[in-house]
Image (spheres, rainbow, N blue to C red):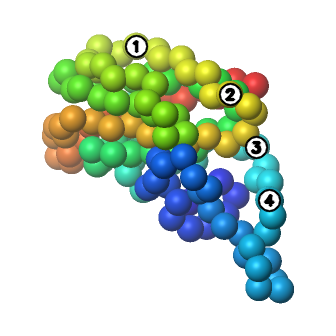
Amino acid sequence: MFPGGTGSVCASSEPRPIATLWVRDGGPAERFDVEPGPPVFCSGWRFFPLSGWAARDRYAAFWVYGRAVELDVAARVPISGRISVDGKIELIDRIAEPRTLRFELGRVGWHLVAVESSALVEEFGKPVGIALRAVRARG
């Protein structure tokens, strides 16, 4: 789901246009704006009420609006991971104990944040990767 609309544009972290909006007369719109809002999680996530969002696939993405984001990340066991913003790799590290990561996103607007886990482990009978305990967008 794209913020404010429908469709499946969450799977790509390539630096290219993320969606095309077709106008009534049959051609693509030159530009369109989507209102600011809370993060929009794509289909690669599983929500656990007590612990937040956990990647249910090795690749999971979400959209965030702002110019900076803070992520509280954790994993049940140490998992190597990679986090990218708008297709640009920002972090490659081992995630285990809870910690806060901060990323500058650039201009104010919607940004695609992708989380890649090297492995999945079982939590409550479901496979999960890196977990997001909180996502805080800034300005």
- Residue mark closest to the camera, 4 vs 1: 4
- Residue mark closest to the camera, 3 vs 4: 4
User: Which percent across, then down, holds residue 102?
Assistant: 54, 17
Specify the quadrant of the image occupied by residue 67. top right
Q: Which of marks 4 and 1 is nearer the N terminus?
A: 4
- The residue positioned 80% from the left and 59% from the top of the image is 31
Q: Earlier in the sequence, mark 2 or mark 1?
A: 1
Mark 2 is on which residue type? Gly
Q: Classify residue 52 as left or right of residue 129.
A: right
Residue corresponding to mark 4: 32
Q: Earlier in the sequence, mark 2 or mark 3?
A: 3
**Mark 2 to mark 4: distance in Å?**
19 Å
The crowding category of the residue bearing disc 3, from other C-alpha atoms within 10 Å (few below 14, some 14 to 19, many at least 20), is some
The reply to whether dot 3 and dot 4 touch (C-beta < 8 Å) is: no
**Secondary-structure class at tag 3:** loop
Mark 3 is on which residue type? Pro
Q: Earlier in the sequence, mark 1 or mark 3?
A: 3
The reply to whether dot 4 and dot 1 touch (C-beta < 8 Å) is: no
Q: Earlier in the sequence, mark 2 or mark 4?
A: 4
Residue corresponding to mark 1: 99
Q: How many labels does the image show?
A: 4
**Secondary-structure class at tag 1:** strand
Residue corresponding to mark 3: 36
**Mark 4 to mark 1: distance in Å?**
36 Å
- The residue positioned 21% from the left and 35% from the top of the image is 118
**Mark 2 to mark 3: distance in Å?**
15 Å
Q: In the image, which disc is placed on residue 106?
A: 2
**Secondary-structure class at tag 2:** strand
The crowding category of the residue bearing disc 1, from other C-alpha atoms within 10 Å (few below 14, some 14 to 19, many at least 20), is few
Specify the quadrant of the image occupied by residue 137. top right
